[in-house]
Amino acid sequence: MEGADDAAIERMVDSKDLQQQSKALDKLTDRVEDRQLDSTRVQEAMASIAASAEADRHAMRMREKELAAVKINAADADIIANELELDRKVAERTLREHKGDAVAAIRSLLR
């Protein structure tokens, strides 16, 4: 009888040990699954950032095309550059941003 009790106790110990191992394995697999989900989220976020950056670049190209199409008076650019001691490119860009309006461009530069 004593042998039967020892066997039963051993089975209970083995059962508890198996339960502990099973719980540890579950925790480990949960962490791996969480990491996989996190990497998917990271990939989605990176794709979103890349799409946003591409949209920004496209918008900048369109804005530059718009500004390049604005006709400005070369004399206005010279006056603004000389009087405000600016680079001519800055004066031209500001004039283009203000659709060739020299007064609005000067006001903008003086702010």
Image (tube, rainbow, N blue to C red):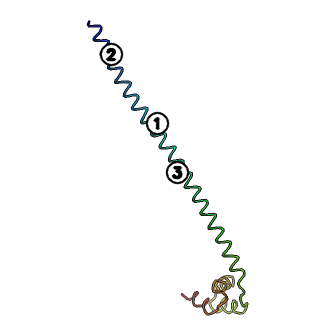
Going by the numbered disc 3, the residue's amino acid type is: Arg
Q: Is residue 97 above or below residue 13?
A: below
Residue at position x 34%, y 24% from top?
Answer: 16
Assign a secondary structure to mark 2: helix
Whole-number angstrom distance, CA of label 1 to CA of label 2 = 28 Å
Residue identified by numbered label 1: 29
Indicate which disc, 1 or 2, sits on the residue closer to the N terminus.
2
Res 75 quadrant in image: bottom right
Whole-number angstrom distance, CA of label 3 to CA of label 2 = 46 Å
Label 1–label 2 contact, CB within 8 A: no
Res 61 quadrant in image: bottom right
Indicate which disc, 3 or 1, sits on the residue closer to the N terminus.
1
Q: Is residue 80 above or below residue 51?
A: below
Residue at position x 43%, y 32% from top?
Answer: 25
Quadrant into which the N terminus falls: top left
Going by the numbered disc 1, the residue's amino acid type is: Thr
Residue identified by numbered label 3: 41
Answer few, some or many: residues within 10 Å of disc 2's Cα (few below 14, many 20 plus, some between 14 and 19): few
